[in-house]
Image (tube, rainbow, N blue to C red):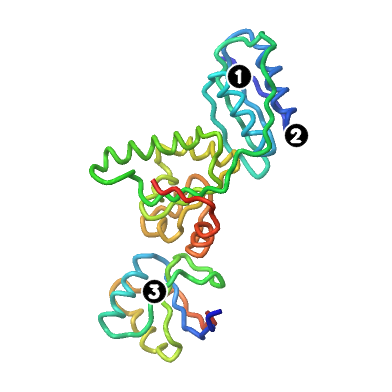
Amino acid sequence: MREKQLRLIATFSTATAAIAMERYCIENGIPGRLIPTPRQITADCGLAWSAPPEAEEAVLRASAADRVAIAATYQLLI
Amino acid sequence: METVKVDALGLACPQPVVKTIKALEALTGPAIVETYVDNETAVQNLTRLAQGKGFPVRSEKLADAHFVVTMEAAAAQKDGQTPVVCVADRRGNTVVAITSDAMGRGNDELGHQLMKGFLYALSQLDELPKTILFYNGGARLTSEGSLSLEDLKSMEAQGVQIMTCGTCLNYYGLTEKLAVGSVTNMYSIVETLTKADKIIAP
């Protein structure tokens, strides 16, 4: 069984915002990846950004970027 | 045309079929016969009864444990020879994955027609699939305005799970427009596909 890791999960209200987040993070070297929203979380959009918890500041900054709007963030063992 | 309602709620097979045959035999001319039942097996058996007689038939899930099967009876059925068919369940463990609103590649207009025909033919099978998954452009088929809703509602009433990817509905702006079945996520899609005996991806 794969060992679970603590991750910072950012959720979005639209799939378009989640896809814009991925583009912005790749362009700006912000760590993380797009994953299907974990079941423990209820979100409008089924795509979420999963990043190492220490990247929280950079992830939150991304929310100000064009078309990226983070709905909520969580710390989850996944 | 006359409409005859048959209340078979709370009845197990073969009672809903028997009551419907009696209603058909009492007809004096062409009529619409609506049978109300509370279980999917009854919907399946009533659908088979109508198909056996060559009557157009559709069904719909009105609420949990509340279904209506509507058949257009051509004429009075007085032969008294209708066999009462009662089969346990028509669903196999097949999953159908619909990834687009067009079937095949080449021309989308043709593809839309093919997909509509595919879903119709699927609804006519003797053994229905257990689940139909809709993702990416497939989400348009379960939303308002889809020309396949009648076939999909018929299958849903017979117990086929109709599941549409929520991310896809969101992406296409169809979240409020889902017209049949339920919303699912990637974890359920993966589980459904991995547990299937057979997957059909037209």
Q: Nearer the viewer, residue A50 or B122?
A: B122
Say which residue appears at 33% left-offset and 36% top-offset. Answer: B113
Is B159 drawn above or below residue B197 in the view shown? above
Image position, residue A44 (x, y; %): 47, 65
Number of marks: 3
Amino acid on which the number 1 mark rests in the picture: Thr
Image position, residue A43 (x, y; %): 49, 68
Say which residue appears at 34% left-offset and 74% top-offset. Answer: A68
Indicate the secondary structure of the residue bearing disc 3.
Answer: strand
The residue identified by callout 3 is A34
Is B155 drawn above or below residue B34 in the view shown? below
Q: Give the alpha-carbon distance from disc 1 to disc 2, as whole Å.
A: 23 Å
Is A14 drawn above or below residue B85 in the view shown? below
Tell me the subunit letter for badge 3.
A
Residue neighbourhood size for the residue with mark 1, other residues' Cα within 10 Å, grouped as few (<14), some (14–19), many (≥20)? few
The residue identified by callout 2 is B12
Residue neighbourhood size for the residue with mark 3, other residues' Cα within 10 Å, grouped as few (<14), some (14–19), many (≥20)? some
Could you tell which of marks 1 and 2 lies nearer the N-terminus?
1
Tell me the subunit letter for badge 2.
B
Q: Which mark is residue B3?
A: 1
Amino acid on which the number 2 mark rests in the picture: Ala
Q: Give the alpha-carbon distance from disc 1 to disc 3, as whole Å.
A: 54 Å
Q: Nearer the viewer, residue B93 or B103?
A: B93
